[in-house]
Image (cartoon, rainbow, N blue to C red):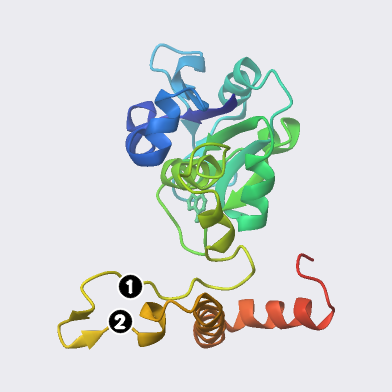
Amino acid sequence: MWRASILTIFPDVFPGPLGASLAGKALAAGVWSLDVVDIRDFAADKHRTVDDTPAGGGPGMVMKADVLARAIDATATDSRPRLLLSPRGAPLTQARVEGLAGGSGLVLVCGRFEGVDERVIAARSLEEVSIGDYVLSGGEIAAMALIDACVRLLPGVMGAPVSGAEESFADGLLEYPQYTRPQLWDGRPIPEILTSGDHAKIAAWRRAEAERLTRERRPDLWAAFLRRFRSGSRTG
Ligand code: ADE
């Protein structure tokens, strides 16, 4: 079973959306497990303090190294990767998600306040991961996004296995446009080729549309795609 452990000061927000839909069904079916650890349970005082003022001054509060280290030591007793969700981290990619989904699970530390004492990041080998170049008020929503992205790749979670291989990013391209009945809606027809029954032509149209959308919307992905294509590799 793929195991996710989450360390947070807001344990009540989990499983949240991870308890619904495909991820929720897979959780109930025992495909993966979620264990939520309240960092406050590892505080040393009766006020259950987890933060303190920043050394050197400045605004906000910093998560204490000693409290967080105790929570990690009680939870991460195996070899799962330990990630700290943080806007400072390496940007999460589908390739990384695939790697994490292929392992035994994750230990996720949700940062809060102005940050986490740098010493516990080093001492407990926390790898910082970001879900995008914007700042959330804490790591909880980022942790949910990361787990959702991993869980949908676990064997047996997605209905049709091929839909994973065809989706956005699997080939470094954005997904082609989709349509369903009715044939004419609001004066807009479904592109004729899709109702032609010619599967080779449909595949070629979809490929061309995926390339067009990627070129128009994501020049960064398009450049990377062209580099791979020109070097003759489909995966590198
Ligand atoms: N915590 C706050 N902002 C974040 C981000 N962009 N990614 C991951 N964790 C975060």
Helix or strand or loop: what does disc 2 sit on? loop
Q: State left or right for residue 234 relative to residue 192.
A: right
Residue found farthest to the front: 197
- Label 2 CB, ligand 1: below 8 Å? no
Asked if labels 1 and 2 touch by Cβ distance under 8 angstroms, the answer is yes
Foreground: 113 or 98? 98
Q: In which quarter of the image is the N terminus?
A: top right
- Sort mark 1 into few (<14), some (14-19) or many (20+) by Cα contacts within 10 Å: few
Task: Return the residue at label 1.
Answer: 179
Locate residue 80: give its quadrant.
top right
Residue 75 in the image: above or below residue 31: above
Foreground: 199 or 87? 199
| Residue at mark 2 to residue at mark 1: CA–CA distance | 6 Å
Q: What residue type is labelled 2?
A: Ile
Locate residue 91: give its quadrant.
bottom right
Image position, residue 51 (x, y; %) = 48, 31
Q: Which residue is pictured at 68% across the width and 39% down the height?
A: 102
Locate residue 117: give its quadrant.
top right
Task: Mark yes or no: residue 91 visible.
Answer: no
Image position, residue 23 (x, y; %) = 42, 37
Q: Which residue is pictured at 58% across the width and 26% down the height?
A: 3
Image position, residue 36 (x, y; %) = 46, 24
- Sort mark 2 into few (<14), some (14-19) or many (20+) by Cα contacts within 10 Å: some
Task: Mark yes or no: residue 89 visible.
Answer: yes
Foreground: 103 or 120? 103
Task: Return the residue at label 2.
Answer: 190
Residue 162 in the image: above or below residue 226: above
Helix or strand or loop: what does disc 1 sit on? loop
Q: In which quarter of the image is the C terminus?
A: bottom right
Q: Which residue is pictured at 76% across the width and 65% down the height?
A: 235
Q: State left or right for residue 21 relative to residue 229.
A: left
Label annotation for residue 146: none
